[in-house]
Image (tube, helix red, strand yellow):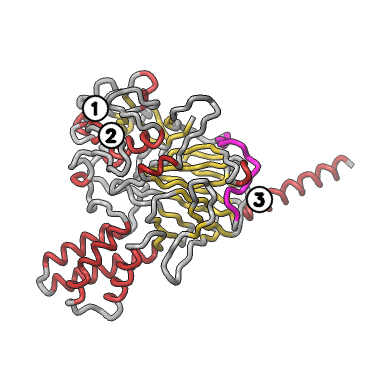
Amino acid sequence: MKTRVMIAICVFTMLSCIARADNAFDITLEGPWIIYQYQNANLGGGKPVLVVVAPSAGGIFHAPNLSTGYGYILSTPTVYCLLWGTECAHDTGKSALTHLSGHPDAKFVPALYPKASQADTWNFVGAKKYGLFAFVLPMPTSYTVDGAWNMRFAKKFDRNGNGYGSGSGADSEYIIGLQLHYDNGPGTFDLRQCADDLTCTTPVPIGAGYHTTLRNTGTLRIVMKAPDTNDACDYHVRSLYHPMLYLLDDAKLSVGGNKNQDYGYIDPARTVDDQGHGDYADKSCFTNDAQGNPESVSTGKPFARHPSNVQAHVLQPAILTIPTIGQQLEALIADIQKLDLKQGILEEIKDDADSLEKDGAFPLSELTQLAESLNTAAAKSRELNKTALADKLKKLAAVVQPKNGADCRAPLMLVQ
């Protein structure tokens, strides 16, 4: 009898695992994300959700793209909700972010916000005035680290690196990529824009013939890709670090008194030795470090950054926002029309220029095709000795082409 019971238990367990595996999926996060465990009556009736927030980046990082194979890049900084099938803020039955035991772990950068009492929540919706992308996600079953890098921190900026790495800011491994694991999931995902009261019902605009539905293929990627750099200073990380902190507390770090002052200035390691210690010997990275500039946290104003700290240190041209790419294309259309291009290429460029200028989403596959068309136009213009036009088209093609963000070393923050 005991043998039969044990067999029955084992069979039930195996069937349960098989059922979970059929629908299980992961969400991969890469980029300068602030992670917040949150509850709101308008989101799943107040059940716990995970909100991930990042500055809109303004030329330092690419805008977020979502992909399960088919995917798209978002042009409108705002709050979005990931639909579980057709449901926003699906209740997974989990109440908190939990590390999957048995897997290596690393640190989140701890993130604080001003509050008069313990009951106060972070008003990330109000922080939209500074420009942000936010995604409301179901609370995962567990998480594992998908990449870590050594960093150290300081309360004050110093061009010689003095004051970095002491106390809580000591050299340590911090998470730069995260995998959120879900034991089961829907057949499809979709996206909705949220109003300020966090009712999330507005479809995301996208061009005719395309859609924002993503099939559950096992992994959903939500990624803000970084530029390719020609040195180890990680200027894109340094440049966007203060905009991350100012979404939480806009008290100026250069003055002091910001809730996150202990982690106010970041210094990513140039490399890591075989013992797992960060190498910070090269002090030249501080020379063009944007964190040494006076900050602006006024509504609508860009965050100040050293004029050479990003553009002079990337192999690819400076990153442009999606609408700006459309505007640049429009400005070049008249010159492109004079070229003897292959049939259809000019029409595609003109259609994409119009679509790119609109708010909403833009398919990643279209960006790749557009880059190919721009490269073709650049080659033709060079044949016709239109060198200046060729250079503009080639530069724009490099900006348009989706880039690999695997080397991004932006730390993930966890709101405390």
Distance of label 1 from label 3 (alpha carbons): 48 Å
Label the magenta part by its dominant secondary structure.
Answer: loop
In the rendered image, residue 404 lying in the magenta stretch gets the answer no
Q: Which residue is mark 1?
A: 281
In the image as oriented, which residue stretches furthest toward the top? 167
- Alpha carbon of mark 3 to alpha carbon of mark 2: how far? 42 Å
Residue 286 horizontal side relative to residue 135, left or right: left
Residue 152 in sight here: no
Quadrant of residue 186 within the rendered picture: bottom right
Name the residue type under label 2: Arg
In the rendering, at what x and y percent does residue 309 appear?
Answer: 21, 40
Question: Does the magenta run of residues contain 95?
Answer: yes
Question: Do callouts 1 and 2 mark residues in contact (Cβ within 8 Å)?
Answer: yes
Residue at the far right in the pictured view: 1
Give the class, few, some or many, for how many residues have Cα within 10 Å of label 2's Cα (few <14, many ≥20). some
Q: Amino acid at mark 1?
A: Ala
Question: Disc 1 or 3, which lies upstream in sequence?
Answer: 3
In this view, the residue in front, 25 or 243, is 243
The residue that appears at 48% across and 54% down in the rendered structure is: 193
Name which quarter of the figure residue 164 lies in.
top left
Identify residue type, mark 3.
Answer: Arg
Q: Give the residue at x 41% y 60%.
A: 361
Q: Secondary structure at mark 1?
A: loop
Task: Estimate the x, y position of residue 61 in percent, counting from the top left.
Answer: 32, 47
Gap in angstroms between the C-alphas marked 1 and 2? 8 Å
> What residue is shown with label 2?
270
Residue with the mark numbered 3: 20
Q: Quadrant of the N terminus?
A: top right
Q: Which residues are magenta?
A: 87-101
